[in-house]
Image (cartoon, rainbow, N blue to C red):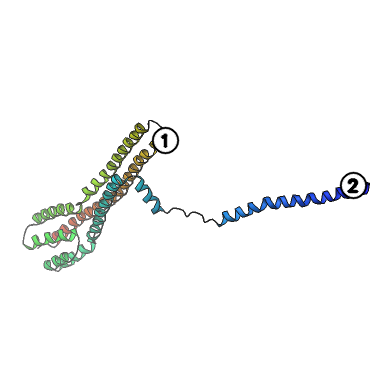
């Protein structure tokens, strides 16, 4: 009897580990399958900067965002045109003065005038007008007056278009703020229609308001950088014109016959 009971307990002990092993296997198998399925699922690709900007532009509303974009593009077009013009106008005045002095030393006024005509930039144009009057026999005082007059005209040409860039800088944030006001009005209209102050109701109007403001300020900042760069370049060229005009008059006085 004792031997039979011992055998029975031994069989139960062997059956329990086998049952536990089967239960663990049944629990682990779905987890492994789920992990494998999760690993095989492709991860979402991160949004590019272009996609983010496009989405924010659409969310801000095409009306005011489009107006601000047009102002930005117009201001940048004027700025790029001015930069190209000023770059071409910024000549080597020292080299030009050295050539003029060499011609004047040899008494070749016509050669000095042709040298100025073949050189680009406002400095060469001013010198050309001065040499024409000098060649016509006008006094040095009259030549100097002509340099001052044509210098003022040339400076005006350099500053042409600068006021339009300043206008774009002013208009961009103004339209952005106008979009902000419109967005706030929309938010209050949504509150009145829903009769509720929950964030979900006012979220869209507030988002439009903030996006138009941000976009307008970004446009103004970009154009302001262009404006300051152009203004600095104009100041440099104007200063070079004044210094070169003084050196030019010194050459005329030195070789005046």
Q: Residue shown at 71%/50% (left/top)?
A: 24
* Relative to 86, 222 lies left or right: right
Which is more N-terminal, label 2 or label 1? 2
Q: Residue shown at 27%/42% (left/top)?
A: 175
In percent of width and height, residue 243 lies at 21, 55
Q: Nearer the viewer, residue 50 or 58?
A: 58
In percent of width and height, residue 212 lies at 33, 43
Q: Nearer the viewer, residue 69 or 235?
A: 69
In the image, residue 4 sits, relative to residue 138, either above or below, namely above
Query: Quick one: SS at disc 2?
Result: helix
> Which corner quadrant holds the C terminus?
bottom left
Q: Is residue 104 visible?
A: no
Q: Is residue 153 visible?
A: yes
Q: CA distance from mark 1 to mark 2?
A: 73 Å
Q: Residue furthest left?
A: 137
Query: Quick one: SS at disc 1?
Result: helix
In percent of width and height, residue 78 lies at 24, 53
Residue linked to disc 1: 199
Residue linked to disc 2: 5
């Amino acid at each position: 009897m004792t031997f039979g009971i011992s055998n029975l307990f031994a069989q139960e002990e062997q059956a329990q580990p086998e049952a536990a092993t089967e239960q663990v296997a049944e629990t682990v198998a779905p987890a492994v399958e789920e992990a494998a399925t999760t690993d095989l699922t492709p991860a979402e690709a991160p949004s590019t900067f272009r996609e983010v900007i496009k989405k924010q532009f659409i969310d801000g509303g095409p009306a005011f965002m489009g107006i601000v974009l047009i102002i930005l593009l117009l201001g940048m077009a004027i700025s790029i045109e001015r930069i190209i013009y000023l770059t071409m106008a910024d000549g080597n005045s020292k080299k030009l003065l050295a050539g003029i002095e060499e011609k004047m030393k040899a008494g070749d006024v016509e050669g000095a005038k042709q040298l100025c005509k073949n050189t680009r930039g406002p400095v060469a144009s001013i010198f050309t007008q001065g040499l024409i009057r000098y060649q016509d026999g006008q006094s040095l005082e009259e030549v100097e007056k002509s340099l001052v007059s044509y210098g003022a005209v040339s400076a005006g040409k350099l500053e042409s278009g600068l006021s339009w860039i300043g206008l774009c800088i002013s208009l961009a944030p103004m339209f952005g703020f106008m979009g902000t006001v419109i967005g706030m009005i929309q938010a209050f209209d949504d509150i009145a229609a829903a009769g509720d102050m929950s964030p979900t109701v006012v979220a869209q109007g507030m988002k439009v308001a903030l996006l138009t403001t941000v976009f307008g300020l970004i446009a103004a900042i970009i154009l302001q950088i262009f404006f300051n760069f152009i203004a600095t370049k104009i100041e440099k060229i104007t200063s070079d014109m004044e210094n070169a005009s003084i050196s030019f008059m010194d050459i005329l006085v030195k070789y005046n016959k």
